[in-house]
Structures are given as C-alpha cells and as structure tokens.
Amino acid sequence: MFKKISLTMAVVYGLIIIAAISTLDLLIILNYRQEQLDKNEAKHILFAEIISNVVKDTLDDTMELNGTIRENSAKLEGRVLVVNNDNKVLADNYAYYIGKQITSSEVDRARESKEQVIEYYQVDGTNIMIAAVPILVSKEVKAVVLISAYIDDILKDIQDLTRLTIGVSILACIISVGLSLILGRKLSQPIEELTAASEEILKGNLNTKVDIDRQDEIGKLAETFNKMSEELYKTDSNRRRFMSDVSHELKTPLTSIKALIESLIDGNNEVSTYKEYLVDINGEIDRLSIMVKSLLTVTRLEEMELRREQIDIKEETGAIAKLLTPLADQHGTHLVNNCQEGITVEADRSKLKEVLINLVDNSIKYGRKDGFTELGCRQTDYGIELYVKDNGQGIPDKDIESIFDIFYRVDESRTRKTGGNGIGLYIVKRIVELHGWSIKVRSKLGEGTEFIIEIRSSI
Ligand SMILES: Nc1ncnc2c1ncn2[C@@H]1O[C@H](COP(=O)(O)OP(=O)(O)OP(=O)(O)O)[C@@H](O)[C@H]1O
Ligand SMILES: [Mg+2]
C-alpha cells in the first residue's frame, strides 16, 4: 500500500481503531440518549396517569381539580393542563389557561386513540416534550391530561456526554496511531538495516554485519544473516587464499624451469650439462604434474556429492593398515590397528579411505625410524573418535594453526626430501567438513603427533 511498513501499519491500525471507536461512540451516545428520553417520558406519563386517576371524579369541580393539579405538579418542571372533550381547559397548574379553548393535535389524537401520545418540538431554540394522556371513565374519554416539559437539561447532558466521548476517542485515536507508528518503525528499522547490509554484500563487502539485538523472529533473521555474511566472507577469503597459494606454488617450478632453459640457451654448454639441466627440468615438471593432479582432486572434491553408507570402521582401518604396511616397513615404522570392534559410522567409503590414507601416510613419512604409527577408533561420550597417532618428529606450535592450509609444509627442506606438496591435510580437512565432522591435532615437537577426527552423533 505505502512504501513504508510503519506508515502502512499506522494507517491501517488508525483506520481500524477509528472505525471501532466511532461505532462504540455511536452506540454509547444513542443508548444514553434513548435511556434519558425514555426515563423522562416514563416519569411524565406516570405522573399523568396518577393525575388522571386522582381527578377523574372531580372533573366537574374546577376549584378542587385545579387544587389537585397544582399540588401534584409542584415537583414537575413543566405545564400541566386538563382539557375536556370540547377542548376547554379545566385545569392549569399555572392557572393561565383555565376556562380557555385550546387546540392541540396531541390532545385530539389521545382522545381518538384512547392512548397516550408523545411528541417532541423545538420552539424558539427550546426543546419541549408534549405528552397527552386520556382520562378514561368506563372506557370513555372524559378529558385529556396535557403535559409540556422542557427537556433542554436532558439534551445538554447528552451533548456533554457526546463531547466527552468524542474527545476521549480522538485522544485514543491519536495515541493508537502514534503507537502504531512507533511499532511500525520498530519493525521496519531492522528490515531497513538488513536491506542496507544485503546491498553492501551485493557490492562485495562480504563481511557486513547487522547490529540487531532482539529475541523475536527478526532477531533470529539478523543472527542468521550475520552467520551467512561471516560464512560468505570465510568462503571468499579461502577461495582468494587458495587461488594465490596455487598461483604461487605453480610459479616456483615454472620459474626454475625458465631459469634452467635460459641458462641453457645463453651458454655454450657441454652435452653433460644439458643432460644435467634436463634432468632438473624433468624433476620440476614431475612436481608440477603432481601438483596439478592434486589440485584436480581438490576441485573434484568441492563438486562431488557424498555417497554415504554404514561402514564398520574396524574393517576399514584393517584394510588401510594392510595396504600401508609395506610403506611402513620401508620406513622402519611399526603400523598397528587399534580400532574398537563394532563401531559403525555413516560416511562416504572412498573419501573416508582417502582421509585415513593421508593421515597414516604422514605419520609414516614424518615418523621416526623404529617408531610406531597407531590407527584407531573409540566410542566417546559424544560419539566416535577416529585417530592416527605416531611418536615421530612432531609439529612445532607455530605451525599447528596452518598445517591444514593448502601447500603448507612445516619445513620446506624436510618435506621436499619426502616429496610432500602440502595438499594431503587440506584434502583431509575438506572431506571431514563435508561429512559434518571436525578434526583436531595434538603434537609435541620431537615426541609425536595425534590427529583426531570427532564424529558427533546427531540426537
Ligand atoms: N604426523 C605428522 N608428523 C609431523 N609432521 C606432520 C605430520 N603430518 C603432517 N605433518 C606436517 O604437515 C605438513 C602438511 O601435511 P600434508 O599432508 O598436507 O602435506 P605433505 O605431506 O607435505 O604433502 P602431501 O600430503 O600433499 O603429499 C607436512 O608437510 C608436515 O610438515
Ligand atoms: Mg601428506
């Protein structure tokens, strides 16, 4: 309707409240008016009936009749006449009309219908009620009691009430429209904030957050929005870092290949030098192709869907231990499988295998001669833990944070010897996260390392 929720709310609520209050006002005023008039009519009719009962036997005695009328009408504010069938006034509480002829349509109608007649008039700005009540003797109309009473006081009361009601209603409308505006503003402000933040994200400022502290649905939306923007920012920075790491890593072997080739072009070399350089170039190309292959694995990993199935972990770790025992033997490391029996986990078999192979491969590669590598699983309070432990060279504290980063190697020269590219743990972490698990590492330099995968059971 309007471009702002607060305005729409104020207008809609305002209209609803105005309609409701007006209807209520009308009902109150009409009801009060009717009640007051009815009360007034009843009072006068009752008076007229009493009079007609009292005077029906003294209609011929003007003195007594007038005395009775005067006496009884003392408390009545108005004029009381008794009119006979010839329209002659037999009695008047103010004595003025006695013996005079009057014409009154109310008297005629009361006489004809033998019923009371009530009418309201306004004469020179004064409001009057006229009541005509027939005096019946043996069902015959003998005369008519005619009462005219001022009702200005009653109408003033009604007017006062009307004014008061309308005044209170207007105040109520103003307050409620004001409150609707405030409420609407309270509702639209966070939405405007969220819209502005979304626009910032659209412009590329991914870490834009909103500061909305509320416990309701809007608060929940703001919380989710903040989490979403944080996630977007993280993903984007990871992507950027990944791209820059990849470019950097690819550049190193390419630079050395170029340098080697250039020195071959420039120099007047022996065949043996050519051979030596070509061997180096070949080595760098091998390194490049391993890197590209690993990168392809990483990219595929992002795209592939998990094919989850129930896996008996002991069986899986057993198979891996068997597969990698020859490598462990080569390094003089003792590989043991210490997995508890009967633990199953829902996972993608080939990816779980990739994780365990990478971790065991590292433990063997970075283990000590005559050391051990332990592959195992155990049930814990919160679920299952899979672990790979060794008593090898360990990881320095300063590197622990970074070892899951792509291409990160603790000690370039040390790992260059073992042929590592620093991709294994990156792949491990991605697969673990894809499954919704987490991985942590405990390590002490010179004492050993333990990688633990935590699989929390969903409740
Ligand atoms: N069990 C371990 N003991 C000591 N250092 C380790 C261990 N596992 C990993 N590291 C350190 O962490 C670094 C990163 O490991 P990661 O598996 O990602 O790469 P890599 O083994 O060097 O190469 P890749 O696995 O790609 O062949 C390794 O270079 C090594 O320095
Ligand atoms: Mg590795």
Image (cartoon, helix red, strand yellow):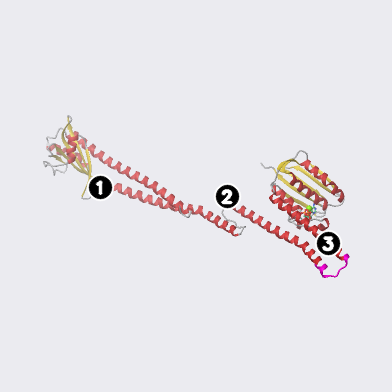
Name the kind of residue labelled 3 in the image.
Asp
The image's mark for residue 280 is 3
In the displayed structure image, the side of residue 391 where residue 216 appears, left or right: left
Q: Residues within 10 Å of mark 2 (few under 14, many from 20)?
A: some
User: Could you tell me how far apart the alpha carbons at marks 2 and 1 are, in whole angstroms?
Assistant: 63 Å
* Residue 62 visible in rendering: yes
Of badges 3 and 2, the one in the foreground is 3
Image: 52 above or below 282? above
User: Could you tell me how far apart the alpha carbons at marks 1 and 3 are, in whole angstroms?
Assistant: 119 Å
The residue at 22%/48% (across/down) is 126
In the displayed structure image, the side of residue 251 where residue 218 appears, left or right: left
The CB of the residue at mark 3 lies under 8 Å from ligand 1: no
User: Could you tell me how far apart the alpha carbons at marks 3 and 2 are, in whole angstroms?
Assistant: 59 Å
Name the kind of residue labelled 2 in the image.
Lys
Name the kind of residue labelled 1 in the image.
Asp
Q: How many tags in the picture?
A: 3
Which residue is more in the foreground, 270 or 214? 270
Residue 76 place in picture, x, y as percent: 22, 42
Q: Which residue is mark 1?
A: 152
Which residue is more in the foreground, 379 or 39? 379
Residue 293 place in picture, x, y as percent: 76, 54
